[in-house]
Amino acid sequence: MAKNSSEEDRNDELRVNVLEAEARSLSGWLNCRIGEHLRFSAEPLASYFFAQWDPVLFDALLLAAAVEFCDKIKRRSAFKWMRKIELRIPVHDPALWTRREIADSLNKTLQLLTGDRWRIEFSKRKKEVAPPQQGQFNLPPVQLPAIIPFSEGLDSRSVAGLMEKEYGDRLIRVRLGSKTNDRPRNSSGRPSPFTTVPYEVRHGEYRFGESSARSRGFKFALLSGLAAYLAKADLIIVPESGQGALGPALVPVGQMYEDYRNHPLFTVQMSAFLKALLGQDIRYEFPRLWHTKGETLQQYILQNNQTDWTDTRSCWQDNRFVSINKHRRQCGVCAACMLRRLSVHAAGLSEAPETYIWEDLRAASFESGAVAGFQKISMQRNYAIAGALHLDHLAGLRQSQIHAHGLDSCIHQIAPALGKSEPEVRAGLDRLLARHEKEWKEFMEFLGPNSFVSRWTEGVYDHAA
């Protein structure tokens, strides 16, 4: 029997109540407990609050964790992207958080980023959070440093290396990943500030059913913003190149809502939210917005003569889905992996085939391109088709009359966000799309006409085995 509209609406609703450790559960709500579902760690917290303890900043971290929990716990409908999310959070100063300019800015930012309708209520904490024990951290003794979010991604590694040439000791990295061997330390071996995400989100007795992960943009932008506030910096460098920053909004995958996680429209909203909450002007800058990832990688190698880019990871999938013989690889066919492989080729470089589960993109069939013995081929097929077609459609965007209005709208939107004129933005966007088109064409020629990727771009799909 078909569901009526009221049943569909209820299926799209989520009510989450964030509880302090010993607080009683609330009937009719999904209860998310601090210490169980949202865990904060002492040393990472100390690495953030190295200069001063500010309960408002802890509450902001709790907000980011709670938003991530909501985003993961509620699976989106197959027929409707938007969810209605009601969230209750205990904070130290609810009078601050309920100020109109803060509440409006927060809701506007989250709605743009996730495509969901948010209603967030703030209540008074029953127990104040004790300040972490502060340590001696390696903060450069300079005025107005620059912040750069740093992960194990290819753009992150490359742009951090390029920016070090310009900023030197004034560049402070904010660690957004989980790997430990590249966390910067000072000469005494002690960690630098912002070296670990200070909280962890766990599903506990629930199940994380949603993988679109749009809230990651809020998490990373907020962590960077708080670091900028604490370091007295006014600049955050966004390392994403143009294809990753603008492409997901210009060419959405399938029927998905546009992805603004690294987009200037989102970062300008985050700047407004941080200004309302903290009273500090913090701007996000995109030094590689009009360049491709391949150009960024090539420039990094030319200027730094480094091979450490091969240690980076672009694939978002965990080891449950992209391991062979208990060894984790990158899948090689999702949108992120396809962009990486395109970029490595454009930079005139290569990687070992065993970097990826799909070792051979030149194979005649999707199945034969995967490493022998891999059992989860069918699970990756839709991701692979979406990734290839996204890059192909982006390559055709400049020549498409159908998408001309969309490009004009994009230019009109992001020009004020970047503080530039529309002709400047049009020239930059045209340059980016022309370069991507050239790189994609050369990559397709390298793969050859019999490659399963090439045939997909022609609308020919081999049947799953």
Image (cartoon, helix red, strand yellow):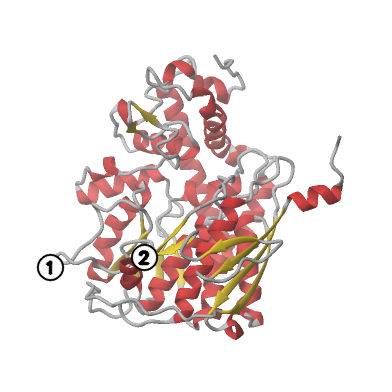
The residue tagged 2 is 41
Horizontal and vertical percent for residue 105?
A: 62, 73
Give the residue displayed 56% in from the left and 23% down from the top.
Answer: 456
Using the image, determine if residue 460 lies above or below residue 164: above
Q: Amino acid at mark 1?
A: Ser
The disc label shown at residue 378, or none: none
Q: Residue furthest left?
A: 188
Q: Nearer the viewer, residue 311 or 391?
A: 311
Mark 2 vs 1: CB contact within 8 A: no
The C terminus: image quadrant: top right
Query: Which circle marks residue 188 in the picture?
Result: 1
Quadrant assignment, res 40: bottom left
Type of the residue with mark 2 = Ser
| Disc 1, SS | loop
Q: Is residue 265 above or below residue 447?
A: below
Is residue 111 in view from this perspective?
yes
Q: CA distance from mark 2 to mark 1?
A: 23 Å
**Mark 2 or 1 closer to N-term?**
2
Q: Identify the residue at image location x=59%, y=19%.
A: 461
Q: Position of residue 187 (x, y in %)?
A: 12, 66
Whether 161 is drawn above or below 135: the answer is above
Q: Which part of the image, by quadrant, shows the N terminus?
A: top right
Determine whether the residue tagged by mark 2 lies in a helix, strand or loop: loop
